[in-house]
Image (cartoon, grey):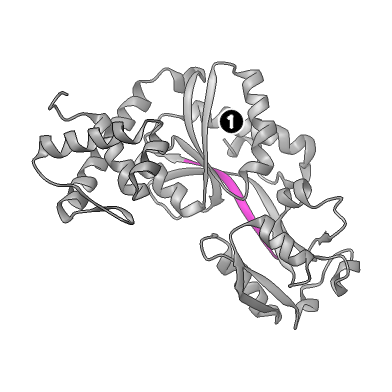
Amino acid sequence: MSRELTLKQLRYFSALADCGNYRKAAEQCGISQPSLSAQIDALEARLGVQLAERGRRGAQLTPVGREVLDRSRKVLREIRILEDFASDAMKTLSGTLQFGVKTSVGPYLMPPVVRRLHRDYPQLRLAIREDFSDPLADQLLAGTHDLILTEMPTGRGDLDSRPLFEEPLMLVCATDHPLAGADAVDPAALRGVDALSFSARSQYHRQIGEFCAHHGAEVHERYDSASLDALRLMAGMGSGVCFLPYLYVASEIDGRDDVVARPLAGEPLKRTIGLAWRKRSGVQTAIRRIGEAILRELEQHHGELVRFDRRDSA
């Protein structure tokens, strides 16, 4: 095996640091665990230092490994900028784009968008990975993604972003709940109501918590969940009400017989979803066309969500 330091070794080492586990890192990189281990060993041999300690709980970086990781990621970011600038694929919408998508948006929005993009740009491939908003922004900055679909604002000054649509959060409760009969729920009616909490990993955990506190709803932290399905199931069993995104409601709740979804009067809870990318990434053409595909699907099926000028959204 060559003793030259390679970008592949740096990428595999970065994946190992992210996953904390050789098997998971290998799966993320699409290679076998022995192959990844061999590349990490080769990197350690080339640098003459131990980068990671194997243990029962996985892999833990050594102090020098953490320093090497910081420098490796700087190198990988610069390489990605160079690739973005030089790649004709960014202009022609061919090749593969690494696309990070917020977990609570992707499954309920992206399937028809992907079909539309495949029809219009058959040479384009999207490698889609889902996560929460904060990890997505970190991964974008690290070069894992070319662009992300996430909640706005990203809170990262070194990213560019464009909002695409505003999505209300709707109250979901069991069909026999006292609020189930309302056409739209007045927030004042939430006083004393038991509410289920979003996991703190969700970007709008605090937003919902503050809303419930303001209107006197009793939030049950021990029933918190990052899974929209889990919250729906708990609401259906009478554990409390929850607040779920409109697109999820349209996909998974409309027509069910165990729970109902009701809008909040005045739409006091909503989130803005948009695209974000690195400022020097050179993916503007892809952003414009992917943004347009998303807007076309929304206008066709959920036109009430599109509230930004199309020219400003991609």
Q: Is residue 28 above or below residue 259?
A: above
Viewer-side residue, 254 vs 75: 254
- In the image as oriented, which residue stretches furthest toward the left? 48
Q: Which residue is rendered at x = 83% and y = 51% of the image?
A: 254
Q: Which amino acid type is shown beneath numbered disc 1? A: Ile
Instruction: Inspect this view and state whether residue 269 appears.
Output: yes
Q: Residue 268's x, y, as percent?
A: 71, 65
- In the image as oriented, which residue stretches furthest toward the front? 56
Which corner quadrant of the image does residue 162 belong to? top right
Q: How many marks?
A: 1
Q: Which residues are magenta?
A: 266-276
Q: Residue 86's x, y, as percent?
A: 34, 21
Q: Is residue 221 above or below residue 311?
A: below
Q: Quadrant of the N terminus?
A: top left
Q: Quadrant of the C terminus?
A: top right
Is residue 50 found left or right of 154 in the rendered image? left
Which corner quadrant of the image does residue 191 belong to? bottom right
Specify whether residue 290 is painted magenta.
no
Is residue 290 found left or right of 25 in the rendered image? right
Q: Which residue is rendered at x = 19% and y = 54% of the image?
A: 62
* Main SS, magenta residues: strand
Q: Is residue 107 above or below residue 254?
A: above
Q: Is residue 247 above or below residue 88?
A: below
Viewer-side residue, 37 vs 302: 37
Instruction: Inspect this view and state whether residue 266 appears.
Output: no
Which residue is identified by label 1? 290
Is residue 19 found left or right of 204 in the rendered image? left
Q: Residue 2's x, y, as percent?
A: 15, 23
Q: Which residue is rendered at x = 76% and y = 52% of the image?
A: 249
Q: Residue 221's x, y, as percent?
A: 59, 75
Viewer-side residue, 212 vs 312: 212
Q: Which residue is rendered at x = 71% and y = 50% of the image?
A: 248
